[in-house]
Amino acid sequence: MPSVLVERVTKNYRDVKALKEVSLNLQEPGCIGILGPNGAGKTTLLKILTNIVRPTEGVALLNGINVSDEPEKALKDVGALVEQPEFYTYLTALETLKFVGRVKGIAEKDLGSEIQRVSEMTGIVEYLGRKTGNFSRGMKQRLSLACALISDPHIIILDEPTFGLDPKGMKEMRDLIKSLNQSKDRIIILSTHLIYEAQEICDRVIIINRGEIVHDTINSPSENIIEVEFEGPAGKVSLPDHMADQTFVDGNSAMFRLRSGTSNSDVINYLSSQGLRIRWVKPQSNLENLYITLISA
Amino acid sequence: MSGTARTLRVATAYYFKNYYRSKSFYLMLIIAILVSLLLTYFSLKYINRLDLIIPKNLLSTLGNSGKEEIFGYLWAFVLLDLPVFASVFFGSTAISSEIENKTAFHIFPLPIGRVTLLVSKYLAAVAVTFITVLIYVAFQAAVFEYLFPGPLLLPFYQSLGLLLIFVFSITAFTFLISSIFNKNTYAYITVFLIYFLVFNAYEIIVEFLYKTTPYYLLNVAADAMEKVYLNISTNPFSTSSSTFAPATIGTLYTSIGVMVAYAIVSFAAALIIFDRKEVK
């Protein structure tokens, strides 16, 4: 089984402490979301895991191997997409993938089928013959993911993978990560700004702020909260017990903590049937509230 | 083949492909062809009019192969700067571009050591640099075969060997400068400034003030490429004796030693810096 262990890692950029004694132990397969505002230290943590920077103190181990000491061994079973990588502009996407595949030790006889597999997964089949210098940001992002997935690694590190993609591309990317996570034999570390993305994809969510892990929780989609704004005072509005277990009313709006299996449309239908006029409905997760609280603290 | 050797071969081929498809490579090819054509024109025009550029009393001291040696010297004299330009194009951005162009984010997370990465890039840069200067050397060989039928003189091959060593050393030197900077422009400018301004100014000052030639400078060592034909110095303050005889074997060995030392020290320093390089 793959494992990721970060022990008391500190990273200083001159006077700035990007990470402060961060520890993280991932022994179970699944998708781990790393949330945090800009400059929180998310990307620095991923850069340490991928040998782009070295920790000032502490160690990072991938499958038990120290990344800084033995990067060639440690990164053998790792696919990574960190920041927004660029490629060597005079090479085609196919040549780039061949290079990555060969460096990762794929046998020549299997290289073609492996490239075909990851190209289909990431939707770049028709662009394989193009030089990467002519790629849009979105295409580069897809190619980066294809490079990360080649050789089917057991540890996948993704830093804002939906960056630069159009809404359709973002959905495809999220679906792809979800499908990768379904096999439950790999660890996927996903850094994102988008709370709903982490909530939708991840099994576990870690919130980083100012270089420290401030929260580490199991992501529970059953704790969805929605906020409903009515055209008049909410009064004593409530939902039946089988739909929600808590209701908070404040002026014209009300927040409901929904039970598992209750969808937003169930709530809208029920409230409408009660003669209430709804202005808007906004999904709000516990995670979002928690995130805002922790980051604002 | 061991894993590291395989990765080195794969990465070298990959970088070589990226280099030879680049605009820099075609620009260098055009420069090499243009300079070769100019020298071809010069050689054809002045083959029988050497008295216009060399005093008659000196001409009379030349042996049977004197004309070929003079033209060999002139071709080598012009050749000296070509590897510098080529290696600046290919080498001075070798490391800085990884940071500035963000290719480091693609390449660093791969299971390939920094040493392997840099060695492969270095070999690829040396190969493309050598290919561009070989165009010039091929022109020279063809012109000499036309003007001086028969086998080429020994100094031609000696000069070619020295050229190969020089390409290794100047490329290593540009890699060192490139490893210091994170911006391509700074790397380009610094290599040019050091090689064409600092080295030359230092050479002139030392020769003028201390009456000795700083043989340990890379540009002085590279002069051996022309001095295998004729031991003439073009520096106005040069203290070394100029003769129409080729440089002594001792001078050649010293030059080779200096160039090899530059190659080893520069590349080792570049490796150390690159190994510690971080992309913030």
Image: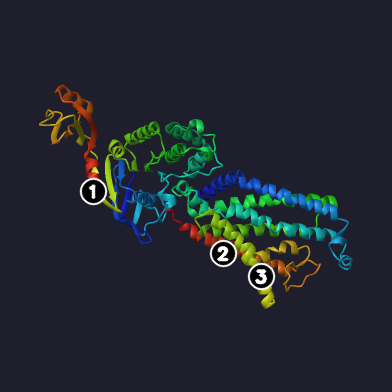
Residue at the spot of label 1: A294
- For the residues bearing labels 1 and 3, Cβ distance under 8 angstroms: no
What is the residue that sits farthest to the front in this orientation? Answer: A232
- Same chain for the residues at labels 2 and 3, yes or no? yes
Q: Position of residue A214 (x, y in %)?
A: 25, 50
* Residue B67: mark: none
Label 1 marks a residue whose chain is A
What is the residue that sits farthest to the left in this orientation? Answer: A236
Question: Is B123 or A19 nearer to us in this picture?
Answer: A19
- For the residues bearing labels 1 and 2, Cβ distance under 8 angstroms: no
Residue at the spot of label 3: B203
How crowded pointer 2 is (Cα within 10 Å; few <14, some 14-19, many 20+) is rated as some
What is the residue that sits farthest to the bottom in this orientation? Answer: B210
> Is residue B169 toward the left or the right of residue A97 in the image?
right
Q: In which quarter of the view is residue B204 placed?
A: bottom right
Q: Residue at x 34, y 41 (%)?
A: A188
Q: Which amino acid is tagged 2?
A: Val
Residue at the spot of label 2: B265
The answer for how far apart the CA atoms under marks 2 and 3 are is: 21 Å
> Is residue A167 toward the left or the right of residue B85 in the image?
left
Label 2 marks a residue whose chain is B
Look at the image and tell me whether residue A175 can be seen.
yes
How crowded pointer 3 is (Cα within 10 Å; few <14, some 14-19, many 20+) is rated as many
Q: Nearer the viewer, mark 2 or mark 3?
A: 3
- Same chain for the residues at labels 1 and 2, yes or no? no
The answer for how far apart the CA atoms under marks 1 and 3 are is: 64 Å
